[in-house]
Amino acid sequence: MSIGLRKTTRNGEFAYDAFLSYSHAWDKDIASAFQHVLEGFDRPWYRPRSLKLFRDETNLAASPHLWQEIERGLTASEWLLVMASPAAAESTWVRREIRWWLTHRSADTLLVGLTDGTLVWDSEQSSFDWSRTDALPREEMAGAFGQEPRWVDLSWLRSPEQAGSDPRLIECAAEFVAPLTGRSKDELIGAHVRQRRRTRHVVQATLAVLTALLLLAVAGGITAFQQRNNARAETLVAQSRQLVAEASSIRDSQPDLARQLLVQAYRLAPTAEAVGALVESHSMPRVLQGRGPVRLVAFSSRGLLAVADGRVRLFDPAGDTEPVVVDPGLRTVTAVAFSPDGGELALGGVDGTVRLLDVTDGRRARPLRVLPAAAGHREIRGLVLTAEGRLVTMTDKGGAVLDVRNPARPRTVRALPGALIAASPRGNLIATEQDDGALRLWNLSGSVSGSARLRRAAAVSAPPGITGTPQAVAVAFSADGQTIAVAGVDSVRLWDVADRARPVARPELFTQSSGGISAVALAPDGTTLATGDSDGVVALWDVSDPLRPRAGARLGGLAAAVGSLSFSPDGRTVAAAEEQDSESGTVRLWSVSGSEQTSAFATVPSEGEFPPAFSPDSRLLAAGGEPTTLWRVDGEQEPRPADTLETFYNAGQAVAFGSDGHTLFAGLPVKAWDTRDPAHLRDLSPETVRTSGAVGISVNPVLPLLAVGRRPWEAVQLWDVGDRERPVFVETLAGAEPASQALAFSPDGELLAAPTRDGAVGLWRVARHRRPVAVGDVPAPKGKTTALAFAPHRRTLLVGDESGRLTAWDVTHPDRPVRRGASTRHTAAVAGLAVHPDGKLAATAGLDGTIRLWDVADPSHLVEVTTLSSGGRYPTATVGFSPDGRMLAISGDAGMRLWTVVPTVIMRSLCAQSSSAPITRDQWHQYLPDRPYDPPCA
């Protein structure tokens, strides 16, 4: 192999071009490696403008054209570098090149690099020792040099990869380059090192710049991705809030669609507004779609709702079962009545016929008897089934009292005269309409089997009608028969008829309808009056104080005048049907508490306003406190009473479940009860005599310790209940003053928070078998601290105060509490406070009577979720979440109410209630035009 180098001038600088001729593929690799090093020396001495390759194959005949090309390359070169090896010495081409060079050039410009074989110089002969030299052709090289030529040993160089890893190649290359440039070897190597260093710096700088650009590109991409996601999230949040607002606007007119919009709103983004609306959704009316115009609705004492719409259907509003369809056997049903025990159903027809059915099994109705038509086949206007087995039938021209104790053999006891308009539930007081518009009351007495005696009682006036004369549009008796509500066109007049001879008129109640009153009903307890008007509005009135009746909620959504009204036996549901002329056949059911709507799913009758106490498994609830009653709860069925806890203190008592799950603590000194058999509580400390009731109790979640408030603003005691049969008093906390819900242990059990006499919050470090140690104070708010609660997963303390403000404090370092956030929504003191087990939701009860839910996931930003429809105001309420997070309990003077607060549970219920009217494509695109059709309850 040989390399020809030619000196050229480019841009005023000297450089060398090269051509390469080789005889073996291995020589090419060596030459490439050698060239790689030559390129690394300080330029501009070597710039390979062109590199021509000529391969000498041993089986390749000499070609004049090939030689001409090589000869042109040699002619243009000033130096010849011969890579000596036995193969090169045998090569015809290499030998020919050497001959040409020695003929036309000086031997001083021929350089030798030994790549293989042997080179030995004989100084005495001034020639190579040809007996041992096999790397050069003897014939061409013998006598060519007068002294030993410059040659370099490259036999160690085997591959191009060594060019960058073996430093020997640099020295070898410098040996060749030095005579070409006239520079010393050391100078060349130094220049090479500097050039490599500069190159390395340039490469490093380039890599740094590229890396920085890459990082900027990645950061930009991430930022753009995050901004896009943030934009999408903000869009979803906005859409979610918009759907909540839309659902609120149609909750009365289109409740089924509103329910589905709420579910979709939560699916888009679980905003505080969506969560609040879900919790409140139980207050939306349920819709029962009739099969035709609905004439009547009536509840039985067992909770079944009879809807007369051509046929009669029996619904169970508490469940999601299909209604039982009853064939009345009548042309048109005009009157419906259940027996007091709910086991029998009487249906009256337009032709005066009455049919009796057995509905003891709510899943089917069994016909009992068809009674003869009333005199003159007059339309049945009303029916009453009494507990004694009497049936009172009423028409506009009279009626009858029948003995139906044996339905197979009914017997007429007495005929009734006049235009009968109403009868009391016991059937012992009836009302007839007189020609002057007044109502005549009649006492109906006598045994069931004997003749009935009818005796005239007093007359009561009806409110004025359209013409100004009295006119009774609708009449309803209370369950005890001692109050009668007489509705005129624009008002309702209540009469106390406990003394039948001298009825007492109560204040008249005026409505706000355009066409007058069309229906009226009294709740079973007689404290709530419902009126239905021509505008399709049901108005509720609180008549618990007959002398000062109070207007309550107005329930809308019906498309026509109200034709029929009925209260459920517990008074917590109002059913209303549109008048019979309406074609829609719609029945609406509202959840109510007294005269107000409520979003609570259940009510626990209890006395007292002490904090609710759930067992750790959430299956038991201790309510009231005056006395304390124990209830079985599961969040889906109605609460069921279990037992009553002994209460000796006339002011009541607070109770709390221990962390073991089956011990209930109460009183001072502390006593314990075993609740493993909830129906039979077992006193674990019968020898302990209580001297006072506890106003508040807090259970340490880790240690067997209780904090007990003696009486309001009096003292806080710490008790050890490691032995639940013998609780041990530990110490009274100096300076602490208790309140109903103002004692709280931290989740790790190490801190106890309690109000202090100066209105601040004191923090004590507690441990078993050690005295509590005061370790810090949370500064006093505006007024005294009235309620406290720790978040369950961190040391965040929520504080309610007299001003109605809720404040979040970080007490990770008790000696340096940090205020995180605050919000004032109550207009009076915060009386009750509790945090949901997931730490994201909190509930407060204010002396302003409102119950508020809060999003406290970010303590620095407390957001009100909703104000609960609690069925009126709870001015001294306390609150509590079940440990499993399913329920919220509110304890007040009207009993204890329960809410479902788990969004997934609520959404399942909403979808089940609206399953008969799924959202249509048109409705979907009306509210969500930019999203593909995806029904939330599909």
Image: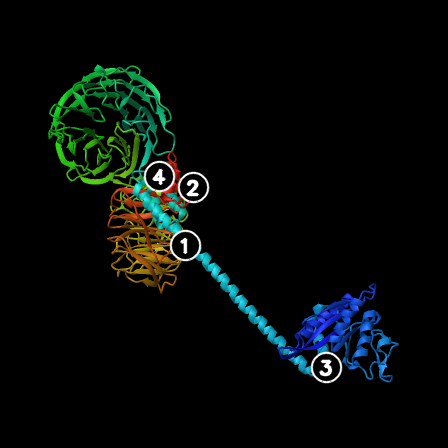
Q: Amino acid at mark 3?
A: Pro
Name the spot of residue 783 as percent of width and height, x first: 24, 59
Q: Is residue 169 above or below residue 877?
A: below
Mark 3 or 2, closer to the camera: 3
Given residues 732 and 431, the one toward you in this image is 431
Q: Earlier in the sequence, mark 3 or mark 2?
A: 3
Q: Earlier in the sequence, mark 1 or mark 4?
A: 1
Q: Is residue 577 above or below residue 238?
A: above
Q: Secondary structure at mark 3?
A: helix
- Cα distance between the residues tagged 4 and 3: 97 Å
Q: Split into 4 quadrants, where in the image is the N terminus?
A: bottom right
Give the residue number, with chain letter if any, for mark 2: 934
Give the residue number, with chain letter if any, for mark 1: 231
Name the spot of residue 629 as percent of width and height, x first: 31, 41
Q: Is residue 180 visible?
A: yes
Q: Is residue 682 visible?
A: no
Quarter holding residue 92: bottom right
Name the spot of residue 271 as percent of width and height, x first: 37, 50
Given residues 720 and 151, the one toward you in this image is 151
- Cα distance between the residues tagged 3 and 1: 71 Å
Q: Secondary structure at mark 4?
A: helix
Give the residue number, with chain letter if any, for mark 3: 179
- Cα distance between the residues tagged 2 and 4: 14 Å
Please tell me which residue is depicted at 24% across the width and 23% down the height of the picture: 383
Give the residue number, with chain letter if any, for mark 4: 257
Q: Amino acid at mark 1?
A: Ala
